[in-house]
Amino acid sequence: MSKFFISCDEATTICDKNQYGEATLFDKVKLSFHFMRCKVCKVYTKHNNLLSKIFGNYAKDHCQKQHCLSNDDKEKIEIEVSKKLK
Protein backbone atom coordinates (compact mmCIF):
# COMPACT_ATOMS: atom_id res chain seq x y z
CA MET A 1 0.00 0.00 0.00
CA SER A 2 2.92 2.35 0.62
CA LYS A 3 3.61 2.28 -3.13
CA PHE A 4 0.50 4.41 -3.58
CA PHE A 5 1.58 7.19 -1.20
CA ILE A 6 3.73 9.77 -2.96
CA SER A 7 5.14 13.17 -2.05
CA CYS A 8 3.82 16.44 -3.42
CA ASP A 9 6.95 16.71 -5.60
CA GLU A 10 6.18 13.36 -7.18
CA ALA A 11 2.53 14.35 -7.61
CA THR A 12 3.40 17.52 -9.50
CA THR A 13 5.83 15.59 -11.69
CA ILE A 14 3.14 13.04 -12.54
CA CYS A 15 0.69 15.89 -13.18
CA ASP A 16 3.09 17.42 -15.68
CA LYS A 17 3.75 14.05 -17.33
CA ASN A 18 0.01 13.38 -17.53
CA GLN A 19 -0.57 16.61 -19.44
CA TYR A 20 1.68 15.38 -22.22
CA GLY A 21 0.35 11.82 -22.21
CA GLU A 22 3.50 10.38 -20.64
CA ALA A 23 2.03 9.19 -17.32
CA THR A 24 1.43 5.48 -16.87
CA LEU A 25 -1.78 4.01 -15.49
CA PHE A 26 0.02 3.31 -12.20
CA ASP A 27 1.17 6.95 -12.06
CA LYS A 28 -2.42 8.10 -12.51
CA VAL A 29 -3.61 5.78 -9.73
CA LYS A 30 -0.91 7.11 -7.38
CA LEU A 31 -1.92 10.66 -8.26
CA SER A 32 -5.57 9.92 -7.52
CA PHE A 33 -4.64 8.51 -4.10
CA HIS A 34 -2.53 11.60 -3.43
CA PHE A 35 -5.46 13.89 -4.32
CA MET A 36 -7.54 12.23 -1.60
CA ARG A 37 -5.02 13.48 0.96
CA CYS A 38 -3.73 16.69 -0.59
CA LYS A 39 -6.09 19.37 -1.83
CA VAL A 40 -3.19 21.71 -2.70
CA CYS A 41 -1.88 19.33 -5.38
CA LYS A 42 -5.41 18.83 -6.68
CA VAL A 43 -5.77 22.60 -7.13
CA TYR A 44 -2.27 22.79 -8.68
CA THR A 45 -3.27 20.18 -11.24
CA LYS A 46 -6.54 21.97 -12.02
CA HIS A 47 -4.75 25.30 -12.54
CA ASN A 48 -1.94 23.68 -14.53
CA ASN A 49 -4.43 22.04 -16.90
CA LEU A 50 -6.38 25.28 -17.22
CA LEU A 51 -3.31 27.34 -18.09
CA SER A 52 -2.13 24.76 -20.61
CA LYS A 53 -5.55 24.75 -22.24
CA ILE A 54 -5.72 28.56 -22.40
CA PHE A 55 -2.22 28.98 -23.78
CA GLY A 56 -2.55 25.96 -26.07
CA ASN A 57 -5.71 27.29 -27.68
CA TYR A 58 -4.25 30.76 -27.92
CA ALA A 59 -1.05 29.47 -29.52
CA LYS A 60 -2.98 27.48 -32.14
CA ASP A 61 -4.89 30.59 -33.17
CA HIS A 62 -1.88 32.86 -33.34
CA CYS A 63 1.17 30.76 -34.12
CA GLN A 64 1.29 31.71 -37.79
CA LYS A 65 0.55 35.40 -37.32
CA GLN A 66 3.27 36.49 -34.91
CA HIS A 67 6.19 35.22 -32.89
CA CYS A 68 5.65 37.13 -29.67
CA LEU A 69 2.69 38.41 -27.68
CA SER A 70 1.57 42.00 -27.95
CA ASN A 71 0.56 43.89 -24.83
CA ASP A 72 -3.10 43.53 -25.86
CA ASP A 73 -2.70 39.77 -26.15
CA LYS A 74 -1.05 39.60 -22.74
CA GLU A 75 -3.92 41.55 -21.21
CA LYS A 76 -6.47 39.22 -22.84
CA ILE A 77 -4.71 36.21 -21.35
CA GLU A 78 -4.58 37.82 -17.90
CA ILE A 79 -8.31 38.55 -18.07
CA GLU A 80 -9.10 34.99 -19.17
CA VAL A 81 -6.99 33.48 -16.38
CA SER A 82 -8.50 35.73 -13.72
CA LYS A 83 -12.04 34.80 -14.89
CA LYS A 84 -11.28 31.09 -14.68
CA LEU A 85 -9.66 31.29 -11.24
CA LYS A 86 -12.64 33.05 -9.65
Image: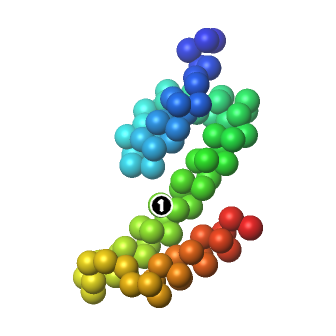
In the figure, 67 relative to 36: above or below?
below
Find residue 61 and report its image quarter: bottom left
Find residue 63 and report its image quarter: bottom left
Is residue 75 something that shows in the picture? Answer: yes
Residue that numbered label 1 is attached to = 52
- x then y, percent, for residue 79: 61, 78
Quarter of the image containing the N terminus?
top right
Q: Which is nearer the eye, 23 or 11?
A: 11
Is residue 28 something that shows in the picture? Answer: no
Name of the residue lying farthest toward the top: 2
Q: How many residues crowd around disc 1 within 10 Å: few (fewer than 14), some, or many (20 or more)? A: few
- x then y, percent, for residue 11: 55, 33
Color style of the picture = rainbow
The kind of secondary structure element at disc 1 is helix
- x then y, percent, for residue 78: 56, 75
Left or right, 28 with respect to 55, comes to right
Picture residue at 45% right of the left edge, 44% below the top: 16
Left or right, 68 with respect to 77, comes to left
In the figure, 17 relative to 24: above or below?
below
In the figure, 8 relative to 62: above or below?
above
In the figure, 11 relative to 74: above or below?
above
- x then y, percent, for residue 35: 67, 35
Q: Which is nearer the eye, 77 or 17?
A: 77
Q: Amino acid at mark 1?
A: Ser
